[in-house]
Image (tube, rainbow, N blue to C red):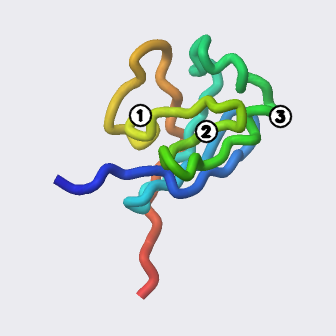
Amino acid sequence: MGALARVTAVDHLGGRVLRVTFSDDLVREIDFAGALPGGLAAVDDDSIFATAEVDPVARTVSWPSGINLDPDVLHGDEETASGPQPRVVREYRLQQSR
């Protein structure tokens, strides 16, 4: 069994959309509009949502307030435990240069 993919980069694309890059070169642009459960209400504001970063220990998307997301759900390996699923806007793999 291979290592689980973890987040290596996150970019805010506007609104509630993040571009998330994983250690296996998968890139997903994910729209969280309407998919932030009650526990994430603290980041349900454009200026706060835009501060998303990679947690260096958990290697997932997090915010300075300490809120973080499950990297397996972000990668598409698992579904959220409750609430609506975020919508994948675009998904692709990085190409290796030769």
> Label 1 belongs to which residue?
73
- Residue type at mark 3 is Ser
**Residue bearing the label numbered 2:** 62
Say if mark 1 contacts mark 2, CB within 8 Å: no
Q: Which numbered circle lies on residue 47?
A: 3
Cα distance, mark 1 to mark 2? 14 Å
Marks 3/1: CA–CA distance: 24 Å
Query: Crowding at label 1, few (<14), some or many (≥20) Cα neighbours within 10 Å?
Result: some
Disc nearest the viewer among 3 and 2 = 2
Depth order, front residue of 35/4 = 4
Task: Classify mark 3: helix, strand or loop.
Answer: helix
Q: Which residue occupies 41% across, 34% down?
A: 73
The reply to whether discs 3 and 2 touch (Cβ–Cβ < 8 Å) is: no
Among the two numbered marks 3 and 2 on one chain, the one whose residue lies closer to the N terminus: 3
- In this view, the residue in front, 76 or 38, is 38
Nearer-N-terminus badge (3/1): 3
Question: Going 80% across and 31% down the picture, which residue do you hit?
Answer: 46
- Which quadrant, please, contains the C terminus? bottom left
Q: Earlier in the sequence, mark 1 or mark 2?
A: 2
Q: Name the image quarter holding residue 32.
A: top right
Please say if 14 is above or below 93: above
Nearer the viewer's eye, disc 1 or disc 2?
Answer: 2
Label 2 CA crowd tier, 10 Å (few <14, some 14–19, many 20+): many
Task: Please state which amino acid type lies under the numbered disc 1.
Answer: Val
Is 73 placed above or below 55 here?
above
